Image (cartoon, helix red, strand yellow):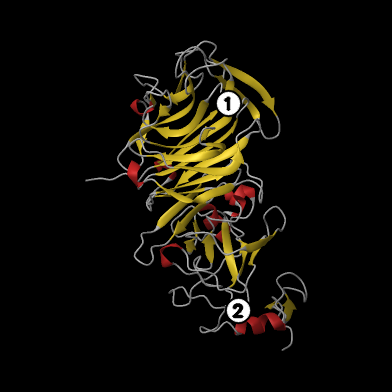
Amino acid sequence: MADVAHSSTSITGGHTNAVAAGAAGFMSGTDKSNLDGLTSGSAQAVKKDGSVAFTAVQSGIDPTAPANLATRAYVDATEILVGGVTAGALNAYTLTPGTLGVGDVITSNTNVVFPTLADGATITVGAANGGDRFLLLHGASAADNRVWKLTAQGVAGVSAWSATAYDGCDTAAKIVKSKLRVPAQHGAAPRLYIYAGSASPTVNTTPLFWLQIDSNGTLNDVLRYREDFCQTIAPTNATMLAGSPILSNFLNGTGAAFAIEADNSAAVCGSISVTTGSSVANARGGWITSWVASATNPAEGFSIVMARDIAIHLECVVAVPVLSNASKEYKNVIGFIDAISASSAGAQVTPNGLYIQYDRTNSVNWAIDVTVGGVPSITAGSTAADTNYVHLVVHKDAGTNTARFFVAGVEVGSGFDTSGLNSTRLGFAAVVFSSVGTGAAVKAMKPDFIDITVAVPARRYS
């Protein structure tokens, strides 16, 4: 078809071109053919009655009205749909890093089909509405725990499964803002996950952690408390920890003391130390939840019940300047306990609790202890307590009776039963206590920070 010159009739008759060929506004023959192709049944057509819908937008502004269109980037920034979460460790895989998280790929080391996820969920390559995405909660490294998009399903004995870091949750900036939703499936209610790890993670290095909260939960349902000891003034006995609305400190025994430590590096921003006392049996020192009647009963202050529907994330970085020995035995406890008491032999007993511990008489390594009714269940990791700072995490998802323990980003064991604590009131404590109180006072614990997140069920109305 020839180009069409748009013309107008002049006063004196005849025609003059209103738009010169090739100028802006000039319609070529090709343009006309394209317009002629927009019939009611064509793929390019959009009908105002909705029978042929507008299906995509390439760019746009953030929506403000109910009928506004939204880009995928905007939706992902609000909430990411995923087809499921891992129920346990995947088979061995290899991570091939991209650039700062972008383009990272994990590939199975063997030719197997990608496994079924928690609650019997399955994901499929290319599935819509997040059906090809999954949240990895049990990575070979905790730094792998983020959203992945399945790109190869895998065929048993023939080919391996593989997945690429989902581009809505691949960089550090995207990860820390992520809120993920798993739809209702196989009889399980929908679930919501929020990021609960470091505020400035290094992708593929920093352990990443996620909290499962109530399916109707919002960020208003999450309580978070962080104590960064580099920002405090060394407190004195029987006073509130300076600047803290939650923690009180306590000391007893000759020589017991707190002190600000000048530990400043890329990994540590100052710390506060606890020195155990001497001459007093069962000397103690540390921090517990505030407003308690006795320094031996943390559960009297701000406390929680370790119910099935509550999610908990406890994270800390701590060092042990002077290790326990036969002449000065002591125990470090960081976590949730109801009380601290002493047995006739002088050893400390915690009737109920979920906490991290260093107790040389049990293990020289950092361990997790789930104690119910005075009966401890202790599992030690492979990292020894020493003068080096170590990153410790206890994590429990809502809807489960299982706590998970990480030391320096490596998971210890395969989960620990907390069902015996479902009706027990527990308070937070970071405590050092000596078993007998003999020997000189020693500097026994230096926390850099302690971070606690508790996600409670959504509000209910009768």
Q: In this view, does 386 lie above or below 382?
A: above
Callout 1, which amino acid? Asn
Q: Nearer the viewer, residue 325 or 163?
A: 325
Is residue 4 among what the camera can see? Answer: no
Q: Which of 429 and 246 is in front in this view?
A: 429
Q: Nearer the viewer, residue 383 or 12?
A: 383
Per the image, label 1 sits on a secondary structure element best described as loop
Q: In this view, does 194 lie above or below 14?
A: above
Residue at 64 percent across and 21 percent down: it is 261
Q: Who comes first in sequence, dot 1 or dot 2?
A: 2
Per the image, label 2 sits on a secondary structure element best described as loop
Q: Residue 157 carries which label?
A: 2
Q: Tell me if 388 is positioned left or right of 404 in this view.
A: right
Q: Tell me if 32 is positioned left or right of 406 in this view.
A: right
Q: In this view, does 287 lie above or below 266?
A: above
Residue 462: x percent and y percent?
21, 46
Q: Which mark is residue 325?
A: 1
The outermost residue toward the left is 462
Splitting the image into 4 quarters, where does residue 317 fall? top right
Is residue 60 among what the camera can see? Answer: yes
Q: In this view, does 224 lie above or below 7?
A: above
Quick one: quadrant of the N terminus?
A: bottom right
